[in-house]
Image (cartoon, helix red, strand yellow):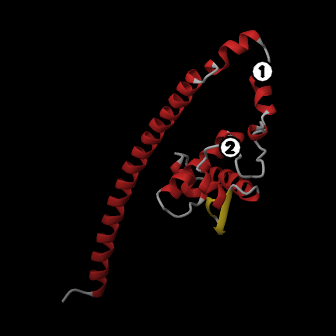
Amino acid sequence: MPSVVGLLEEHELAARRRVDGLREEADRIQAELVAAEQEWQEWVIARRRVGTVLAPDGGGIADEKAAPVPRDADVRSAPEQAAKAKSQVPVWREGLAWSVLSVDYQRILEALADRHRLHQGPLTCQELATLFGLDAVPAKVEALRSKAKRLVARGWLAERQPGRFTLAQGVAGQGGAS
């Protein structure tokens, strides 16, 4: 009859092997996720560039030669797309485009919108950091938490459970299109 300690050691060894295998699989999936996200970002950039070229005004190229007014001034004049400094987040209201936010904030919204579309639950800032390919070290996680809390305070995100973020109801229905 095997000893209790021997049985425990066998179970511990089996559990350790399973953990090691899952870690290897997680590393492989993480590398695949980073590559897929980079590809996705390249397609987003390509779509925006094509949209700019195919815009009715030709992306503003002819207008820039005729009128040397900076395009930032045009953006500021439109109430729905008012330019904001990177650290400022406007209060969300119906019809406000995500483009008023800096790229970092838009990225958080896009990640949570993807989760919403897939009917998945909220994300923690540590999960967001991993999703973005960042090291989940306290400095990076806290930087994301600061941004997420600012988005909550301005009505873009909801935090129904402490530290778990999802799109606010109206923002979720909007889908980022305005």
The kind of residue on which mark 1 rests is Pro
Please tell me whether residue 117 is drawn above or below residue 159 in the rendered image: above
Can you tell which quarter of the image residue 101 is in? top right
- The single residue placed furthest to the left in the displayed view is 1
Question: For numbered disc 2, what is the local secondary structure?
Answer: loop
Going 51% across and 50% down the picture, which residue do you hit? 131
Q: Residues within 10 Å of mark 2 (few under 14, many from 20)?
A: some
* Mark 1 or mark 2: whose residue is earlier in sequence: 1
The kind of residue on which mark 2 rests is Ala
Task: Report how far apart the C-alphas of labels 1 and 2 lie in the structure.
Answer: 21 Å
Frontmost of labels 1 and 2 is: 2
Q: As drawn, is 144 to the left or to the right of 37?
A: right
Return the residue at label 1: 70
Return the residue at label 2: 97
Please tell me whether residue 87 is drawn above or below residue 43 in the rendered image: below
The answer to whether any part of residue 56 appears in the image is yes
Question: For numbered disc 1, what is the local secondary structure?
Answer: loop
Q: Which mark is residue 46?
A: none
Please tell me whether residue 33 is drawn above or below residue 173 in the rendered image: above
- Measured as percent of width and height from the top left, residue 22 is found at 35, 60
- The single residue placed furthest to the bottom in the displayed view is 1
- Measured as percent of width and height from the top left, residue 125 is found at 60, 57
Going 67% across and 19% down the picture, which residue do you hit? 60
